Structures are given as structure tokens and as C-alpha cells.
Image: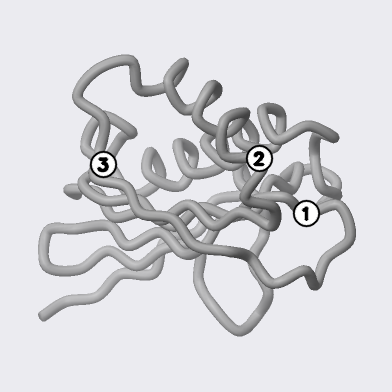
Amino acid sequence: MTRQIVFTTKAAKPPPTYSQAVKAAGLVFVSGTSPADPATGAINGATIQEQTRQCLTNIRAILEEAGSSLDKLVSVTVVLADEDDFAGMNEEWLAWFPSDPPARQGAKLPARIPGLKISIAAIAEA
């Protein structure tokens, strides 16, 4: 099996301990992606809607670098710091995926980074 590391400067830079994504077995495995602005590294957005938008913008850039796209998403894990943000996240989510959304599961984010409300990991067809 061939494994290709995916990196783009058009998405938030990950810590040195993991890759933005790995392409293998006809799939793209996108690491948990924060709402960080690719240019500054700072969390972008005060609201869950803004942070969800930035996460998905980052994921789109990573998938495009891998030769894939959001419409090829198969499975997504959304991790929220506050469960009360679910409705706001879902509102933005529906703007991006009005029909035929990918499979989705959720989890709770440990509060380690001030202001961070969301992280999203994804799997897409290559």
C-alpha cells in the first residue's frame, strides 16, 4: 500500500506531531482540523458558525490538495468543546451540505486551547 502525506499552506498548519492528511487505499484521511486561519495560525471566529466555516474551509483546501473535494466526503467526526454549540454548528453544516451529507459522529473536545470551540476530522474518496 502506498501512503502519501498531504500538506497545503491554504489550510491551518498542524503541530509537528501529525499530518494534515494522509492519502492511502483510495481514501484521504484528514486529521482533526481546527478553525485556525492559515495565514496567522490564530483561531478564526468567535461564534461556532464562524469556526465551523473555517474548519470546513481548511478541510476543503486539504482535500483539494489531495485531489479530492467536499462532495467526496464519506465520514466526518465533529468534536465540540460545548455541547450547547451543536445547533449553531449544525446551522453552518447545513449551509455546506444541504443534501446527501457524509456520515457524521460527534464527541466532546477537551478544553485545552482558549477560544477553540470545534475540531473536525474527515475521510473522503481520493
Query: Which mark is first along the chain, 3 or 2?
Result: 3
Q: How many marks?
A: 3
Label 3 to label 1, Cα distance in Å?
A: 24 Å
Whichever of labels 2 and 1 marks the residue nearer the N terminus, that label is 2
102 left or right, relative to 13: left
Image location of residue 88, percent across then percent down = 62, 28
Q: CA distance from mark 2 to mark 1?
A: 12 Å
Real-space Cα separation, disc 2 to disc 3, in angstroms: 23 Å
Q: Nearer the viewer, mark 3 or mark 1?
A: 1
Is 116 rendered above or below residue 84? below
Q: Quadrant of the N terminus?
A: bottom left
Q: Is residue 26 above or below residue 86?
A: below
Tell me where residue 57 appears, x and y as whole percent. 55, 33
Nearest to the observer: residue 87 or residue 117: 87
**Picture quarter containing residue 71?**
top left
**Image side of residue 38 versus residue 18, left or right:** right
Residue in view at x 69 percent, y 45 percent: 35
Question: Which residue position is annotated with label 1?
Answer: 116
110 lies left or right of 94: right
**Label 1: element kind:** loop
* Eye-nearest disc, 2 or 1: 2
- Residue at 32% in and 62% down: 29
The residue at which mark 3 appears reads as 73
The residue that appears at 49% across and 62% down in the rendered structure is 107
Given contact means CB atoms under 8 Å apart, are the residues at marks 2 and 1 in contact?
no
What amino acid does circle 3 point to?
Answer: Leu
- Identify the residue under disc 2: 85
